[in-house]
Amino acid sequence: MAVLTVRKYGDPILRRRAEPVGEVTPEIRAILRDMIDTMYREVGVGLAAPQVGISLRLMVVDDEKGRGPRALVNPEIVDQGGRVVAEEGCLSIPGIFAPVARAEWVRLEAQDEEGQPVTVETKGLYARVIQHEMDHLDGVLFIDRLDAVRRDRVKRAIKKEGLREDAPHSALAL
C-alpha cells in the first residue's frame, strides 16, 4: 500500500466529473487501499479519487461507528432531506474552513470493494462527508457552495497568500 499525493486547489483534475468504474478489479481495490492509507496519513475523514489524481468515481470515508474505513464505488445519492450548516475544510484546500449548508441525511447506493451493491443511510457528520466527497466526484469544491462574497474572499486570499502546505489539519478536513 502507498500514500498518494493529494492534489491541491488549482489542479484541473479537481474540476472534472469523474468517470464511472466499469468493474471492480484488483487494480481498483489497490487504488482504494492506497486512498485509505492516504486519507489517514492526511488526517482526513473522507477522500475522493480525483483528490489523488484519479478521475474515477471512487471514495473512501471513515466509518462513523468506529468500524474502520469504507470504500464506495460508483456512489450515487438517491435520497436526502433536511438542511444543516456546519464548518468544512478540505484536504485539497488546506487551511481554509467555512460554513457550508448540506442535507441533514442522505441515502446512498454504491458498490463495495468487492463489487457488491450497498446502501448507506446516514445523518450528521457521515452524511456531510458523503456529500462533500460526492461533490469531488462531480468536480465541485466546498468553496463553490459558499455565498458569492465569502467565496470571492476565499479565492482572493488563496491567490494572495497561496495554500500553506503546513496548514493544520482538522478532523473535518474532508
Image (cartoon, rainbow, N blue to C red):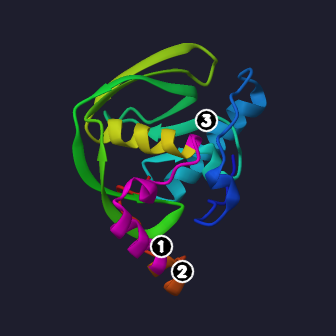
Range of magenta residues: 137-156
Q: Is residue 96 magenta?
A: no
Mark nearest the camera among 1 and 3 is 1
Does residue 174 appear to the left or right of 74 in the view shown?
left
Residue kind at label 2, given as amino acid type? Lys
Q: Is residue 42 left or right of residue 22?
A: left
Disc 3/disc 2 C-alpha distance (Å)? 30 Å
Q: Earlier in the sequence, mark 1 or mark 3?
A: 3
Residue 93 x %, y %: 50, 65
Q: Label 2: which residue? A: 159
Q: Is residue 64 above or below residue 85?
A: above
Q: Secondary structure at mark 3?
A: strand
Callout 3 amino acid? Leu
Residue beneath label 1, please?
A: 155
Q: Position of residue 5 (x, y in %)?
A: 66, 60
Image coords of residue 130 (percent x, y): 42, 37
Disc ID at residue 58: 3
Secondary structure type for disc 2: helix
